[in-house]
Image (tube, rainbow, N blue to C red):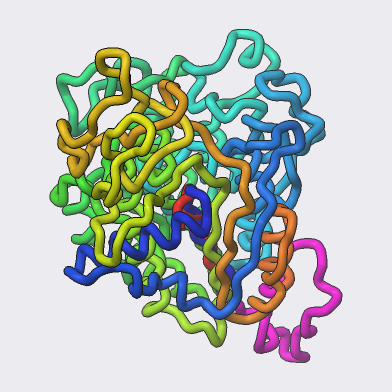
């Protein structure tokens, strides 16, 4: 069973800051705390650049670690021959993902994310789009529509119709324009967006075999009430857009990432041929873009808990688990802080230039740049421990940017030793496919027995991929 987790933040920095945060949440100094991913026996580095960008975006990187091909910034599920936003460069340049390879091999497959299910990372598993922002046809230019390109939500329901588990946000992209949301009835921004009038949830239901049990849920209560032994297909859309940050989550309406992973594995592991599960902690990335380090790190802690839960439910004897990031962020911390210092606290000294205090966590750029009276803001005058505090940055930007560093790849299970050293990012899915005997390269695989059943070993391998969103 191959599967994976994804995150987003400069890898090594992310790991240490996240582990310290987790330790301090348990009333320990923090530095000695080990994350679940820290316990994985194999570690590699991944080179994240896009074909046309030194510092990548999440669409091109997702295409790399899911489809095995590096791509242009802003494109998903297509080769570098496709130019961003140019629909007419798509046809003939589509590339398939490891999710498709697993499905073609008879495995069950699933997607779990804290972003929209049609956001950059999950969309690379099933869609082929010249623009990651074509969430529904409402976001597409007339030229692209006239040339026959389909939006990403449409492709989710049509390209691979038998994905067993889909969970995340993105409800509004499935419904006709201005349809009232089931949860936020008075919020105009939560209303349906589709110009074609399609109800994609109904279409999803219509594609499922009558003898199978298909369930659509929109809240945590419905999700946890399911009899999972009688669930063959599950579509869970818990927010109109991205899911809420873990610190802000309504635990009645929105499940945690750990809860979604638990449900997904229980459904997928019923298949004796194995499964592939893509799990994304995508709001780590969003927290960093907003300069909200506390939100980002709490998302990372929840992601690590999901990794731990997945480890309890599977065995490294027959499951290859890969945890990586799509890219880093310009996120850092320092200042010679003493042991046990709050990760969100102040450095022990003042700046020797402007004589003002500074927090241990800082960003290279982003919305935290503030000048008061012609000088850098005095952070001791604000609540720098607030959940939404925007850490100071060196350069003012409305949104903090990604970083270009290599990111870590943690792995355990069969063939995990192939993920060591420094690799191009698009190497990752080829290792997973090799381990599971799926995809194009099957020369090394054990043949089927004379009785026609699958041989033991890699042919039955479950896979898990956990992309973090830049923040191990």
User: Residue 190 vs residue 107: left or right?
Assistant: left
Q: Is residue 296 visible?
A: yes
Image point (61%, 79%), residue name: 460
Magenta highlight: main SS: loop
Q: Residue furthest top?
A: 142
| Relative vertical location of residue 251 with respect to residue 102 in this rendering, above or below | above
**Magenta region includes residue 445:** yes
Image point (67%, 73%), residue name: 436
Q: Residue furthest right?
A: 443
Count of numbered marks: 0
The answer to which quarter of the image holds residue 450 is: bottom right
User: Residue 275 vs residue 182: left or right?
Assistant: right
Identify the magenta region. Answer: 435-463
Percent x, y for residue 110?
Answer: 48, 57
The residue lying toward the viewer, choosing from 187 and 466, is 466
The residue lying toward the viewer, choosing from 311 and 277, is 311
Percent x, y for residue 242?
Answer: 35, 37
Image point (48%, 48%), residue name: 9
The answer to which quarter of the image holds residue 175 is: top left
Percent x, y for residue 90?
Answer: 74, 28
Image point (36%, 35%), residue name: 291
**Magenta region includes residue 198:** no
The residue lying toward the viewer, choosing from 417 and 368, is 368
Q: Look at the image and tell me in which quarter the N terminus lies.
A: bottom right
Q: Is residue 227 visible?
A: no
Percent x, y for residue 91?
Answer: 77, 29
């Amino acid at each position: 069973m191959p599967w994976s987790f994804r995150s987003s933040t400069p890898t090594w920095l992310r790991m240490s800051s996240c582990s310290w945060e987790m330790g301090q949440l348990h009333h320990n100094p923090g530095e000695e705390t080990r994350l679940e991913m820290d316990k994985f026996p194999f570690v590699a580095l991944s080179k994240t650049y896009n074909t046309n960008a030194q510092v990548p975006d999440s669409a091109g990187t997702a295409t790399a670690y899911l489809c095995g091909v590096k791509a242009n910034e802003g494109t998903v599920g297509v080769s570098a021959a496709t130019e961003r936003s140019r629909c007419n460069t798509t046809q003939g340049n589509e590339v398939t993902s490891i999710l498709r390879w697993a499905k073609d091999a008879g495995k069950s497959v699933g997607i779990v994310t804290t972003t929209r299910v049609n956001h950059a990372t999950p969309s690379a598993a099933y869609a082929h789009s010249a623009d990651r922002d074509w969430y529904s046809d409402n976001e597409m230019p007339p030229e692209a529509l006239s040339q026959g390109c389909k939006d990403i939500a449409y492709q989710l329901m049509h390209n691979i119709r038998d994905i067993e588990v889909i969970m995340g946000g993105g409800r509004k992209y499935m419904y006709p324009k201005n349809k009232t949301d089931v949860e936020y009835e008075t919020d105009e921004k939560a209303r349906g967006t589709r110009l074609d009038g399609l109800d994609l949830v109904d279409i999803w239901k219509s594609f499922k075999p009558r003898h199978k049990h298909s369930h659509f849920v929109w809240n945590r209560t419905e999700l946890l009430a399911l009899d999972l032994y009688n669930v063959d297909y599950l579509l869970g859309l818990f927010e109109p857009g991205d899911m809420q940050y873990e610190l802000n989550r309504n635990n009645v309406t929105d499940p945690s990432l750990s809860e979604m992973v638990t449900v997904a594995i229980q459904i997928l592991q019923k298949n004796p041929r194995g499964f592939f599960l893509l799990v994304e902690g995508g709001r780590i990335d969003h927290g960093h873009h907003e300069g909200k380090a506390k939100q980002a790190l709490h998302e990372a802690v929840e992601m690590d808990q999901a990794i731990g839960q997945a480890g309890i439910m599977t065995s490294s004897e027959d499951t290859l688990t890969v945890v990586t990031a799509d890219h880093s962020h310009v996120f850092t911390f320092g200042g010679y802080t003493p042991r046990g210092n709050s990760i969100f606290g102040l450095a022990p000294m003042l700046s020797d230039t402007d004589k003002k205090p500074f927090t241990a966590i800082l960003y290279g750029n982003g919305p935290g740049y503030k000048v008061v009276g012609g000088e850098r803001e005095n952070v001791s005058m604000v609540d720098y421990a607030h959940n939404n505090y925007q850490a100071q940055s060196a350069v003012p930007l409305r949104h903090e940017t990604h970083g270009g560093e290599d990111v870590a790849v943690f792995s355990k299970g069969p063939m995990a030793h192939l993920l060591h050293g420094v690799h191009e990012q698009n190497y990752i899915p080829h290792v997973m496919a090799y381990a599971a005997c799926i995809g194009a390269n099957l020369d090394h695989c054990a043949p089927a027995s004379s009785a026609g059943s699958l041989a033991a070993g890699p042919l039955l391998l479950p896979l898990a991929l956990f992309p973090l969103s830049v923040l191990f």
